[in-house]
Amino acid sequence: MRISELGRRSGVANATIKYYLREGLLPPGRATAATQAEYDESHVRRLRLIRALVGVRGLSVASAKQVLDAMTEHRGDTHEVLGIAFGIRPPGEGAPDTSGEETNPEASALVDAMGWSVSAANPARRTIDETLRALRSLDIEYDWQALLPYAELAERTARHDLDRIETITDPLEKAEQAVLLTFLLEPALMALRRLAQENESTARHGGGDT
Amino acid sequence: MRISELGRRSGVANATIKYYLREGLLPPGRATAATQAEYDESHVRRLRLIRALVGVRGLSVASAKQVLDAMTEHRGDTHEVLGIAFGIRPPGEGAPDTSGEETNPEASALVDAMGWSVSAANPARRTIDETLRALRSLDIEYDWQALLPYAELAERTARHDLDRIETITDPLEKAEQAVLLTFLLEPALMALRRLAQENESTARHGGGDT
DNA sequence: GGCAATTGGGTAGTGCCACTGTCTAATATG
DNA sequence: CATATTAGACAGTGGCACTACCCAATTGCC
């Protein structure tokens, strides 16, 4: 198919497709002439993938590209794909690596306490220390130990995630699902927490309606 | 104190403080003359709060304003504050309300199944339906029932959140902590999940190091 | 074969956002 | 009184995610 049909089938504007092509998010079609290229089902799918990561999850186009690249390069290696994908930080500050040094003592303590084995380079460590630092700068007493119960719940969540991914045999699909379930599910999980919070709050404070 | 000291003490650039004042995120100081205003500790704190919501959590300035407004207006009513705060959607699409109609059948089914009592207006419902729709548009079999185990974990998370908030007696602080723990903790919780995922993945796939 | 319609590819423009810089008149301070 | 600082208003900046336009080549259709 040509670009117009691709646009129609994926629900993405023509000009936007060209933009994604330029940015390398979408692989180019098979050129049949100077002004003609053939796209196929894989392009439609890829576009939906992009829209999901950018639109639903809210990743930046650049971050989405990294995720997508990791996904297609290391097709088989779920572990590797996730490793790269985790390096993506949501829109926010992004000081360069700081790798090597143990700059995140609280995350380390937490990881140790949980008996987890995770790379020192996992940027999630920094997120945790940053959050705790922010909370304390607001005079809220909060340290890694306060996160322990959450870590326990996160562990179960992760087990669930991995259980699901393991049911897939095709290594291509596996890497893809790993990324999708990790990233796309995040807003939904936070949404669940909010629903649960409202429920719990209602239950405790009585029906404080409005 | 005057603006320069406020800037020094909060670590926010002078011009940025003026910007926040203009946007209404930061209440104006007590004007002592046409070109002089007095700021106090509450301004320092508020600035740290803003930076936490905008910088760490990644809220937009406009969203942060809504949260902050809700927090200061309905000081006592934790339930109310959270209700308003939940209305904030992270940077992403934002179709207007669609209130009233039951447009989110999957979220509703989930809420029913969990026996939760949450307002039909809670925007988290939409997030859930959106996510599920996105997943299915990518040919991934995923419905609200697949979310049930996560909902169960979310419920426990929420209980924890509320437990902590209940320890606070001062209604002012209470509302503030509710907002902070709900919002600021989100990146940390997702970070925990990623750490747990890496750990679990390593445990299952053997030490697939790199 | 002729011709309107479509296409690829490139460049420039748009709108929004979160600041940032500059200017002015009015203090504050030594 | 001289110098520095400030509040407040406004214009400018840089980044991002598109979006519009243009052109030459090609296609489909009569």
Image (cartoon, coloured by chain):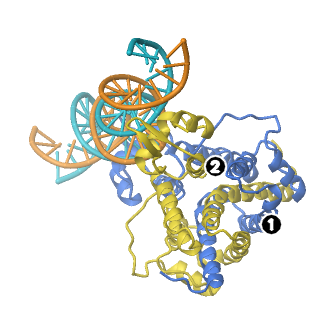
Chain colours: A yellow, B blue, C cyan, D orange
Disc 1 residue crowd, few under 14, some 14–19, many 20+, Cα 10 Å: some
The earlier-in-sequence mark between 1 and 2 is 2
Residue type (three-letter) at the residue carrying disc 1: Pro
Subunit of label 2: B
Residue under numbered circle 2: B71
Above or below residue B187? Residue B97 is above
Residue B178, percent across and down?
Answer: 68, 58
Nearest the viewer among A175 and A158 is: A175
Residue B97, percent across and down?
Answer: 71, 35
Residue under numbered circle 1: B149
Nearest the viewer among A196 and A68 is: A68
Nearest the viewer among A169 and B47 is: A169
Residue B97 horizontal side relative to residue A57, left or right: right
Q: Is residue B96 visible?
A: yes
Residue type (three-letter) at the residue carrying disc 2: Met
Residue D13 horizontal side relative to residue A64, left or right: left
Q: Secondary structure at mark 2?
A: helix
Q: How far apart, in angstroms, are the residues tagged by discs 1 and 2? A: 32 Å
Q: Secondary structure at mark 1?
A: helix
Q: Which image quarter: residue C8?
A: top left
- Residue B62's label in the rendered image is none
